[in-house]
Amino acid sequence: MALINISDVALGYEGKPIVTELNFSVNKGDYLCIVGENGSGKSTLMKTLLGQKHVISGKIEFGEGLKQTEIGYLPQQTEVQRDFPASVKEIVLSGCLNGCGLKPFYSKSQKTAAFRNMEKLGIADLANKCYRELSGGQQQRVLLARALCATKKLIILDEPVAGLDPVVTQNLYKLIKEINNEGITVIMVSHDIDAAVEYASHILHICHKPLFFGTKEEYVNSDVCCLFTSNGGDEK
């Protein structure tokens, strides 16, 4: 069975659908990029996968032993979150909370995993720094390390490069791809369709009817891609 299977799903608020007829699957090792206009339902889909919202209709099934509590998540940041007065180490470790159960402390293995993830993302030397003193790119690396502490299977990233300069953006994209190459499945919401075409294995475009889902090679050759990429016009 697929890691996630979406069948005839409709999503929205207060029973009013934003997006309908969602049908796609995510397999182990995939890098799925979800693109579309503002308000098309991208973030709503992410919240639904995380169990924060319910479907209006249809079915979402998880396979390969995946539980919603075992999904790593990097949300869009607010200004309040960027000013959070905690150390880098504390924030990264918080990704292990779902694995603590009733224990009031982190285990040695969880602390080791947190340090390894900080090393992997090049922020181990910032462990005792205050999060709000970091640059935007450093903060995103911290949140990515936290997401990795929560999972061994799947991370969900909601606009992870928003507000970052081009060099930092490219570096973060490369880090995400390296994580995917190590066997972690990635689902990323993005406005950057050109980057989706470069890095993703599969693309879901949900602002168009019919909705597009397929490999990036299929997407590149689709009419939807011609309308929205730099080869055929900027996304509106």
Image (spheres, grey):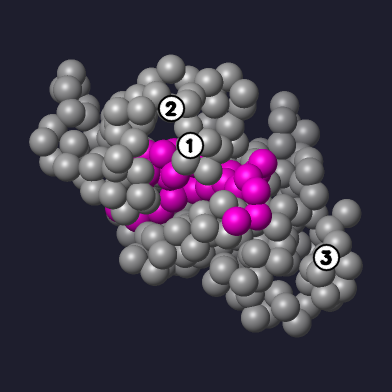
Q: Camera-side residue: 138 or 220?
A: 138
Residue at position x 33%, y 59% in the image: 64
Residue 144 % position (x, y): 43, 44
- Distance between the Cα atoms at labels 1 and 3? 30 Å
Instruction: Answer left or right for 96 relative to 55.
Output: left
Label 1 or label 3, whichever lies nearer to me, is: 1
Tell me whether the residue at label 1 lies in contact with that at label 3, contact meaning CB atoms closer than 8 angstroms: no
Magenta-span inclusion, residue 160: yes
Residue tagged 3: 228
- Distance between the Cα atoms at labels 2 and 3? 36 Å
- Distance between the Cα atoms at labels 1 and 2? 7 Å
Q: Where does the magenta region start and end? A: 140-167
Residue 45 % position (x, y): 62, 44
The relative height of residue 90 versus residue 11 in the rendered view (above or below) is above
Tell me whether the residue at label 1 lies in contact with that at label 2, contact meaning CB atoms closer than 8 angstroms: yes
User: Dot 2: what SS?
Assistant: helix
The relative height of residue 43 versus residue 228 in the rendered view (above or below) is above
Decide: few, some or many residues near mark 2? Use Cα within 10 Å; few <14, some 14-19, many ≥20. Answer: many
Residue tagged 1: 139
Q: Quadrant of the N terminus?
A: bottom left
Magenta-span inclusion, residue 201: no
Whichever of labels 1 and 2 marks the residue nearer the N terminus, that label is 2
Q: Decide if residue 8 is in sight here.
A: no
User: Dot 1: what SS?
Assistant: helix
Label 2 or label 3, whichever lies nearer to me, is: 2
Q: Camera-side residue: 29 or 211?
A: 29
Instruction: Answer left or right for 217 relative to 145.
Output: right
Residue tagged 2: 131
Figure quadrant of residue 109? top left
Residue at position x 36%, y 28% in the image: 129
Residue 118 % position (x, y): 31, 45
